Amino acid sequence: MSAVPAIPSSRVAVLFMVMLVAAAGNTAMQSALPAIASELDMPDVWVSLAFSWSALLWVITAPKWARMSDRRGRKQLMSVGVIGFVASMGMCGLVLWMGLAGMIGPVVTFMLFALFRSLYGGFGSAAPPAVQAYVAARTERAERTKALSMLASSFGVGTVIGPATAHYLLFPPFGLAGPLIMFALFGVGVLIALHLHLPNDTPRFAARGAVAAYPNSASMNSPDAEEVEGRALDAALPDVEIRLPWRDERMVAWLIAGLIGGHAQAIILGVVGFLVRDRLGLHDRPWEAVQASGSVMLIGAMATLLAQWGLIPMLSLAARSSVLLGSALALVGILLTGVSYDFYGISTGFAIASLGFGLFRPGFTAGASLAVRRHEQGDVAGKIASINGAAYVFAPAVGVALFNWWEPATFILIGAALLFLIVWGRKALILNQ
């Protein structure tokens, strides 16, 4: 019988909130930014580039923070991540409010927004691996899977909460910047709870933090509990660094599939808010634009949860089947979204696309993981996280630029990528057991 007590529920709740607040805040911001861009008369692509810069910093810094989580001081790393989130959201919100109030010009507003957004890209990635390592280092195997599974679900819950609450957080004097200010305050509350309820005790077991992908409305691609548990247990093995070549024939096809599908999803996620604003004629009704964009994103997030929490466990889909079926559904959804000009058509198309991507991402992750041996899981996990993050560096800005130039071009590009993935993947995606 284990002599190690489970982590108290109050501490687990704090850890859950550390993970959730970032996903909720980011999706709430995505709901509001198209309307803010209209009010400031800022080019849409500039807004997307600010997110690209943040995503690039996340990709660069996430592995470094994950390595630091191998040591003690995980509570401090969680604090760094939450402080990065609070500082970024708060200062971005204040800058956007000042721009909306006419205190500073649009160009200065955008430059400051991009600068402050980088605080999250550089420091926010410290929290997720520290949370995972904290739990893995303080739980027996029997309770670890349940705890890690619950924490992994926080990103999914956050992507629903963010769009659902964004339009309720529009209030004077901050107006459209209200969701950013309020989520910064929520982050302060989480930071206080972290310091009050989470002691910085010594780990009972060796554990490593997994590299986390950039959180957005697609962030429900976090590794499942068994994967994270496996990496935590692998930490007890001799500390020999495994570095597989990117062209390793066992996993290269899965990584290519992840790169293609990830970019396709990143483009539609970057475009959807602007598409809703433009096609519903809400340029001059920014508060309605936030509500409409948030509603579409909420429906998409719920469809993704349905895929990952319902269909995959119920259908017991294999990795290859999950990738191919998900890509086919995403293709249908993208085409429907591309030809829809009313709220119901856009919502239905985006929901089907989100359902497809919700099947695709776990399939790609599982396929790459199953293709290699157990002691190689840490390196593959890092490569998966890099690909997931890299998709958000340039793809959203490219998608928005194409959308502004010629709307069908965006959907032709995504459709072509998914069609290629389906045709090529039928032969290329084979597990080497």
Image (cartoon, helix red, strand yellow):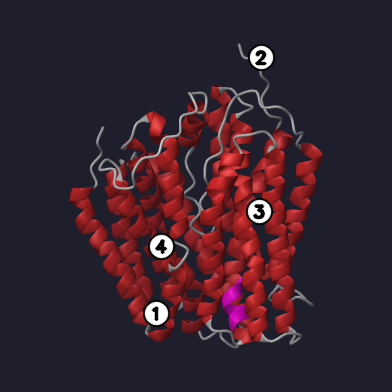
Residue type at mark 4: give it. Answer: Gln
Which numbered tag is attached to residue 402? 1
Q: Are marks 4 and 3 in contact (CB under 8 Å)?
A: no
Q: Residues within 10 Å of mark 3 (few under 14, many from 20)?
A: many
Which numbered tag is attached to residue 21? 3
Inter-mark Cα distance, 1 to 4: 15 Å
Residue type at mark 1: give it. Answer: Leu
Q: Which residue is mark 2?
A: 3
| Of labels 1 and 3, the one closer to you | 1
The residue range painted magenta reads 32-37
Residue 88 is at least partly visible in this image: yes
Q: Earlier in the sequence, mark 1 or mark 3?
A: 3
Inter-mark Cα distance, 4 to 3: 22 Å
| Of labels 2 and 1, the one closer to you | 1
Q: Quadrant of residue 178 in the image?
A: bottom right
Whether 95 is among the magenta residues is: no
Q: Earlier in the sequence, mark 1 or mark 4?
A: 4
Q: Residues within 10 Å of mark 1 (few under 14, many from 20)?
A: some
